[in-house]
């Protein structure tokens, strides 16, 4: 189960950039779908780090989740 969470996290954080690239090419904007997928992936990495009791993963993904989550909230509020 732990490995599956880690693999899903890696898949989501990597795949998140494809919609961004396509959206950016078309509109020069940031894709809402990309940020949703990215934040989900980061949260899964954080869960994975917690399950593994891996302090670097917990700290890095905790901070990233806060920052990316803030960007996602701003994107949702202001387009």
Image (spheres, helix red, strand yellow):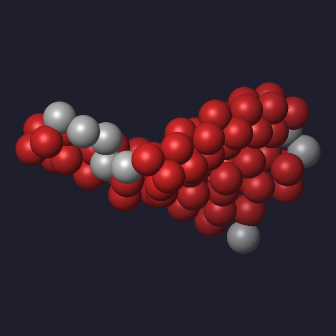
Q: Residue at x 26, y 51 (%)?
A: 19
Residue closest to the eye, 26 or 39: 26
Residue at image point 87% right, 33% down: 55
- In this view, 58 is above or below 9: above
**Which of the 4 image quadrants contains residue 24?**
top left
The answer to whether residue 21 of the structure is visible from this angle is no
- The percent coordinates of residue 43 (x first, y second) are 67, 53
- Residue at x-position 62% and y-position 65%: 4
Q: Residue at x 74, y 48 (%)?
A: 46
Near-viewer residue (41 or 68): 68
Instruction: Pick the quarter of the image with the N terminus.
Output: bottom right
Which percent across, then down, holds residue 30? 31, 41
- Locate residue 34, reporting x and y percent: 38, 51
Vertical placement of 5 versus 14: above or below? below
Hey, which residue is sitting farthest left in the picture? 26
| Of the pair 7 and 39, the residue shown nearer to us | 39
Q: Residue furthest front?
A: 78
Indicate left or right for 36 with 68 as reference: left
Residue 50 in the image, given as x and y percentages of width and height: 85, 50
- Residue 78 in view, yes or no: yes
- Seen in the picture, residue 75 relative to 8 is either above or below; the reply is above
User: Where is 11 relative to 63, above or below?
Assistant: below
């Amino acid at each position: 189960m732990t490995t599956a969470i880690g693999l899903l996290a890696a898949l989501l954080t990597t795949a998140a950039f494809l919609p961004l690239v396509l959206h950016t090419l078309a509109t020069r904007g940031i894709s809402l779908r990309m940020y949703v997928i990215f934040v989900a992936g980061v949260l899964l990495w954080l869960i994975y780090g917690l399950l593994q009791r891996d302090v670097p993963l917990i700290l890095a993904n905790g901070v990233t989740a806060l920052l990316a989550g803030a960007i996602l909230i701003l994107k949702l509020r202001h387009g």
